[in-house]
């Protein structure tokens, strides 16, 4: 695929994994899109929504999405839970960040938080309206083939370890 300079329109040459440069020496960086993702906890259970759109329609997904310009990861995490599942949460910890590819190979960095359910009635919407959201006990979390994204396996291992040491 030929990339063209966003400044002058000339074709670019790849210099690094994420850097293309044109004849006029304009740098064209392709950096990952940042997303905020949330493990929502209540009474020893984790809340999952069901994706309603491709990619991965019908698979279980944690609430989350891309961070808006000017928005912090924390604000985006709280907003995404409200938009996708209709509830309010309180962030209690940061779990980690996980690199992945989103649809069509777009690089993403997923910033994952842990939150406690605060209030509200669960109502699926946005891209999580593919079925009724479910609470899964910490001891019976979904297997990889049930989950929407491959990178969830690494996050889930870290979450299980976090839960073992924090007992939230």
Image (cartoon, grey):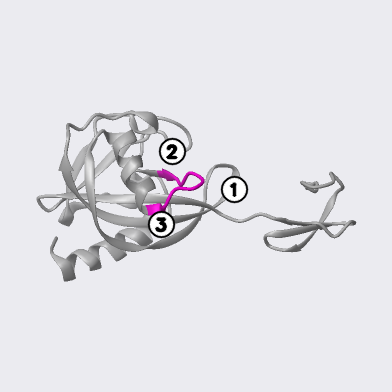
Of all residues, the one furthest to the left in this rendering is 43
Residue at 35%, 46% (x, y): give it.
Answer: 147
Q: Nearer the viewer, residue 135 or 97?
A: 97
- Magenta stretch: give its range: 65-73
| Quarter of the rendering containing residue 79 | top left
Q: Would you say the residues marked 1 and 2 are in contact, meaning their CB atoms lie under 8 Å apart? A: no
- In the rendered image, residue 118, in percent from the top left (x then y), is placed at 16, 44
| Residue at the disc numbered 2 | 56
| Residue at the disc numbered 1 | 105
Q: CA distance from mark 1 to mark 2?
A: 14 Å
For discs 1 and 2, the disc positioned in front in the rendered view? 1
| Rendered image: mark on residue 111 | 3
Residue at 80%, 48% (x, y): give it.
Answer: 5
Residue at 24%, 29% (x, y): give it.
Answer: 123
- In the rendered image, residue 20, in percent from the top left (x then y), is placed at 76, 57
- In the rendered image, residue 18, in percent from the top left (x then y), is placed at 67, 60
């Amino acid at each position: 695929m030929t990339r063209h300079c966003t400044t002058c329109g000339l074709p670019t040459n790849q210099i690094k994994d994420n850097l293309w440069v044109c004849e006029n020496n304009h740098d064209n960086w392709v950096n990952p899109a940042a997303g905020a993702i949330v493990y929502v906890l209540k009474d020893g259970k984790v809340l999952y929504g069901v994706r309603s759109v491709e990619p991965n329609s019908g698979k279980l997904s944690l609430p989350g999405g891309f961070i808006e310009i000017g928005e912090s990861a924390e604000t985006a995490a709280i907003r995404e839970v409200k938009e996708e599942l209709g509830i309010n949460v309180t962030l209690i910890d940061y779990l980690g960040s996980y690199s992945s590819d989103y649809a069509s190979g777009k690089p993403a960095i997923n910033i994952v938080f842990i939150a406690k359910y605060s209030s509200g009635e669960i109502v699926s919407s946005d891209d999580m309206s593919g079925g009724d959201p479910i609470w899964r006990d910490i001891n019976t979390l979904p297997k990889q083939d049930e989950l929407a994204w491959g990178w969830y396996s690494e996050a889930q291992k870290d979450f299980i370890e976090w839960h073992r040491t924090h007992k939230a």
